[in-house]
Image: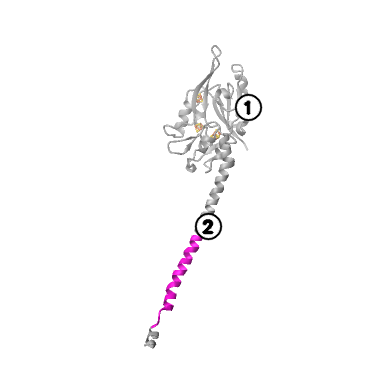
Amino acid sequence: MTTYAYLLDLGRCLGCQACVAACKTGNELPQNVQYITISEKSWGKFPTLQSVIENKRCYHCAEAACVSVCPTGALFKEDGLTRLERDKCSGCGYCVDACPFGVPKVAADGLSSKCDGCAEVVKAGGQPWCVKTCPSGALRYGEREEILAEARQRVEFLKTRYPKARLYGESEAGGLGVIVVLPADPETLDLPLNPQIPAAIQTWQKVVQPASLGLTGLAVLTTGLAAFIARRNHHKELERMRQQPMAKAAARPTSDTKESDR
Ligand code: SF4
Ligand code: SF4
Ligand code: SF4
C-alpha cells in the first residue's frame, strides 16, 4: 500500500504565513483557531548568528500518542493521516496532554482541534490548502518514499550553509507523516529527539485507565444486580398485595353463615 507524507523544508520556509491563512480559510476555522504556528528561532552569536523559521503543526505520527489515549475514537489513523472526528470528541483533553509536540488544543467550543491533513481534499485528489499556497516550495505532499528522497537531497544541499542540517521524522514516533528538513539540531528547534507520550500519561494508561475501566465494569455489575433485586422485590410485593384481598375475602363471613347463626 502506498503511504503518503508531507515535506516541510525549513531551509525554504519564508515565514510568510500564507499556509496559516490558507489553512484557516480552506477549513473555515473559527477566529481564534489555527493549525499552524510560525515563529522565528535564532541561535549562535554574532558574527555566526543563524536563524530559521519554525513551522509547527501536527506531524501525523504513525504511532500517534493522541490516538492511543483518545477514549472515544474521535482521533484515528487513516491512510497515514491522524484524523479527528470532532462529533465524537468528548472534550476530555487527554490528547492535549499526550501529544509530545503539544499540537491538539481544546477550542472555545470545548472540543479538541488540530490539523486533519485536509483529508477530504486529498481523498478527492487535491492538494492540502497549505501545500497549494506555499510560495517557496517549503511544503509538498506526495508518496512518502519520494518525499524522503527529496528531503535527503535537500539536507545534503543545506549542509553547505548549515553543517548540522538533518532529516526529522523518518523513524521518530514510528515515522512521521511530515518529513521535516531541519537546518539545525531538533532541540535547537524545540523538537523532541525521541518523541514519546509523557511518563505521567503512560502511567495513567497502564495503571489508572484499566483500573477505572475495572471500576466502571464493577459499577455496571452492581447497578445491574441492584436493579434485579429491586425488580424481584417489586414482583413479590405485587404478589403479596394480590394475595391480601383474596385472603380477607376468604376470612369474611358469608350472608348464609349469618342467617344460620340467628
Ligand atoms: S503530532 Fe500530536 S496530534 Fe499529531 S499525530 Fe502526533 S501525537 Fe497526534
Ligand atoms: S494539511 Fe490542511 S488542515 Fe493541515 S495544516 Fe495544511 S491546510 Fe491545515
Ligand atoms: S506558506 Fe510556505 S513559506 Fe510561507 S510560512 Fe508557510 S511554509 Fe513557510
Question: Where residue 175 sits: x, y (%)?
Answer: 61, 32
Say whether residue 26 is left or right of residue 12.
Answer: left
Q: Which image quadrant is residue 108 in?
A: top left
At 57% from the left edge and 45% from the top edge, which residue is drawn?
A: 211
At 52% from the left edge and 56% from the top edge, which residue is drawn?
A: 224
Magenta span dominant secondary structure = helix
Q: Which amino acid does label 2 sit on?
A: Leu
Q: Which amino acid does label 1 sit on?
A: Ala
Q: Does the residue labelled 2 lie within 8 Å of ligand 1?
A: no
On screen, residue 96 above or below 261: above
At numbered mark 2, what does the secondary structure look like: helix, strand or loop?
helix
Magenta span contains residue 217: no
- Residue that badge 2 annotates: 225
At 49% from the left edge and 25% from the top edge, which residue is drawn?
A: 38
Quadrant showing the N terminus:
top right
Question: Where residue 154 sits: x, y (%)?
Answer: 60, 22
Name the mark nearer the viewer: 2 or 1: 2
Q: Which image quadrant is residue 178 in?
A: top right
Magenta span contains residue 238: yes
Q: Which of the two labelled residues, at mark 2 and mark 1, occupies the earlier sequence position?
A: 1
Quadrant showing the C terminus:
bottom left
Q: Give me the C-alpha separation between circle 2 and circle 1.
A: 62 Å
Segment tinted magenta in the rendering: 229-254
Question: Where residue 232 sits: x, y (%)?
Answer: 50, 63
Q: Which image quadrant is residue 209 in?
A: top right
| Viewer-closest of 242 and 106 | 242
Residue 79 seen: no
- Residue that badge 1 annotates: 149
